[in-house]
Image (cartoon, grey):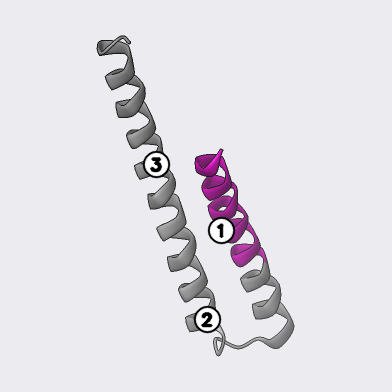
Amino acid sequence: MLAYLLLSGASAGFGAGIDLKVNIKELLESNYYDSFFNKGNAGSAILLLAFICAAIVSLLSSLALIRNPL
């Protein structure tokens, strides 16, 4: 469940950041806010990496439970 929360946060961050960056550029015709949106994309990338790590740990944990029956 936590892995899906991480994935949804990452995808929402990427989607909202890209759309908002395009709209701000058209509205203000400036590159002043690029560093702000780049930091948001970096945060979303970290969330995506956390999802991948959580998914791998979940798979390894389930494989360990299958190999060691109670």
Q: Amino acid at mark 2?
A: Phe
Q: Based on the displayed image, in which of its 4 quarters is residue 20 positioned?
A: bottom right
Q: Looking at the picture, does residue 69 appear above or below residue 45?
A: above
**Residue bearing the label numbered 2:** 36
- Residue 17 screen position, x and y as percent: 60, 66
Q: Is residue 52 above or below residue 29?
A: above
Please give the name of the residue rendered at 56% of the width and 85% of the height, measured from the top-left corner.
33
Q: Residues within 10 Å of mark 3 (few under 14, many from 20)?
A: some
- Viewer-side label of 1, 3: 3
Looking at the rendered structure, the secondary structure element under dot 1 is helix
What is the quadrant of the C terminus in the image? top left
Identified at 70% across, 87% down, the residue is 28
Given residues 26 and 47, the one toward you in this image is: 47
Is residue 10 on the magenta stretch?
yes
* Label 3 vs label 2, nearer the camera: 3
**Residue 30 lies in magenta, yes or no?**
no
- Residue topped by disc 1: 14
Helix, strand or loop status at disc 2: helix
Amino acid carrying mark 1 in the image: Phe
Which residue position is annotated with label 3? Answer: 54
The answer to which of 31 and 9 lies nearer the viewer is 9
Q: Residues within 10 Å of mark 2 (few under 14, many from 20)?
A: few
The mark nearer the N terminus, 1 or 3, is 1
How far apart in space, not on screen, are marks 1 and 3 (Cα)? 19 Å
